[in-house]
Image (spheres, rainbow, N blue to C red):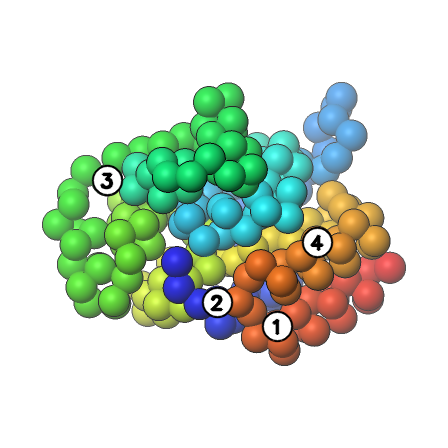
Amino acid sequence: MGGTQESVLTPGFWLLASGICQQITVPGKMTPVIFCHMIIFDSSTLILLAKIELLSPFLASVEMRAAIPLEVERECCGVKKTLHALMIQKALEESRIEALAVKNPKIASKLQSDFSLGSGEAEAIALALKEKAQLLGIDDKNGINASRLLGIPFTTAVGILVRSREKGLLNHLDALAKLTALAECGRYKQSIIEDARRKMEARK
C-alpha cells in the first residue's frame, strides 16, 4: 500500500452530478441512499475505512455493488486477523462486498509494470476497467496517478468521509473524530486534511 498524496473532494464525486449515481430516500430507511452501479476498492482505502469504523455505515448507505479483486481480499484478510481485517472479512461473508477474480491477469501484470503498482492496486484497477466500474476507491499514490491517466473515476478514504458528512451520514463531531483518526493512520498531506476539515466545518 503506497503513500497517499491527494484526494478527490469535488462536489461531483460519486458522479452525482452526472446522473450515473443519484441520492434518494428509500421508505423505511433512516439514512439517504446513494445509488450507483459499482464501486471497487483497493486494499488501501478499504483498510482505512475499516480502521475509522466508516466501512459498515458507508456500505449500508449505498445501493450498489461493492467489490474487490481476490488479491485485495488476500492483502486485507489473509495475514494477521486484526480488527479491521475481521471487519472486512465480515462484510465479505455477509455479501456486502464481493470478491471477484481478475479474468485477464496479463492486464493486471502490465498495469503493475507500467505504473509501479502493488499486486492489489493493479488488480483493483484491472477490475475497474473490466467491470466499467463507476468509482474506484484507492489511496495509493501510484494507483491514483494510474487511475487519472486511464480515466477511471476515483476517490479516497478521506473523500468518502467528507462526502458521508455532506450527505448527513455522520454528525459533525463523529466526522471530525474520524478525520483525526485518518490523519493518524493514513499518509495524507496536511493540506488534504485541512481541506477536508474546512468542508466539514462549512456543513455544520
- Tell me where residue 142 appears, x and y as whole percent: 35, 68
Nearest to N terminus: mark 2 or mark 3: 2
- Tell me where residue 186 appears, x and y as whole percent: 55, 61
Classify mark 3: residues with Cα within 10 Å, few (<14), some (14-19) or many (20+): many
Nearest to N terminus: mark 3 or mark 4: 3
Residue located beneath label 4 in the image: 178
The residue at the point 76 percent across, 21 percent down is 28
- Residue 140 vs residue 156: left or right? left
The residue at the point 36 percent across, 44 percent down is 75
Q: Are marks 2 and 1 in contact (CB under 8 Å)?
A: yes
Circle 3: residue type: Val
Residue located beneath label 2 in the image: 4
- Looking at this view, name the residue that lies furthest to the left: 106
- Tell me where residue 10 appears, x and y as whole percent: 60, 66
Classify mark 4: residues with Cα within 10 Å, few (<14), some (14-19) or many (20+): some
Is residue 39 depicted above or below 183 in this figure?
Answer: above
Circle 2: residue type: Thr
